[in-house]
Image (cartoon, grey):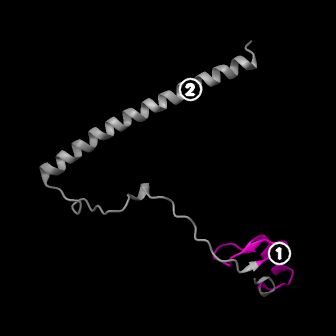
C-alpha cells in the first residue's frame, strides 16, 4: 500500500504532466487557428467578401463579450445593523421584508 507522501508525489507529477499537455494543446490550437484564419482570408479575397456581407461590426462577437458588471447604485436604505439596500428592482432584502411585516415603513430606513 502506498504512503500518503508517495500519493502526493504522484499527484504532483501528474499535475505537471497535465499542465504540460495543456500548454501543448494550446500551442496546437493556436497553430490550427492561424491556418484557419489564413484559409478564410484567401477565400474572402477570392470571392470579394466584405465585412458588411458577413454582417460584421467592430464589436466583439456575442460569445466573447466581457460580462457587464452590475451598476453600482447609491444606498437609499440602511438597517439598524448597518445592512444597506439601493431600493432597486428584484426581491427586497430579508431585513426589509421583515421590517415591513413588523409594521415599519421604508421611510424609517432612508439614508
The residue singled out by tag 1 in the image is: 98
Q: Quadrant of residue 91?
A: bottom right
Rounded to the nearest whole Å, what is the CA distance between mark 1 and mark 2?
53 Å
Asked if the residues shown at circle 1 and circle 2 are in contact, with their CB atoms under 8 angstroms apart, the answer is no
Residue highlighted by disc 2: 16
Q: Which residue is drawn at 22% across and 42% down?
A: 39
> Which image quadrant is residue 55 in?
bottom left
| Stretch in magenta | 78-106
Q: In the figure, residue 79 lies in which quadrant?
A: bottom right
Neighbor class of circle 2 (other Cα within 10 Å; few <14, some 14-19, many 20+) is: few
Q: Indicate which disc, 1 or 2, sits on the residue closer to the N terminus.
A: 2
- Please count the marks in the image: 2
> Which residue is at the front of the view, 98 or 39?
39
Residue 20 drawn in magenta: no
Residue 72, above or below 27? below
The residue closer to the viewer here, 101 or 105, is 105
Amino acid at each position: 500500500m502506498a504512503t500518503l507522501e508517495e500519493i502526493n508525489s504522484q499527484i504532483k507529477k501528474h499535475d505537471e504532466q497535465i499542465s504540460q499537455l495543456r500548454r501543448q494543446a494550446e500551442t496546437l490550437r493556436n497553430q490550427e487557428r492561424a491556418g484557419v484564419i489564413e484559409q478564410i482570408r484567401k477565400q474572402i479575397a477570392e470571392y470579394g467578401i466584405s465585412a458588411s456581407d458577413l454582417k460584421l461590426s467592430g464589436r466583439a462577437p456575442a460569445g466573447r463579450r466581457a460580462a457587464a458588471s452590475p451598476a453600482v447604485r447609491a444606498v437609499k436604505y440602511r438597517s439598524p445593523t448597518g445592512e444597506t439596500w439601493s431600493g432597486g428592482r428584484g426581491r427586497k432584502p430579508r431585513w426589509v421584508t421583515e421590517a415591513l411585516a413588523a409594521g415599519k415603513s421604508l421611510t424609517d430606513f432612508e439614508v
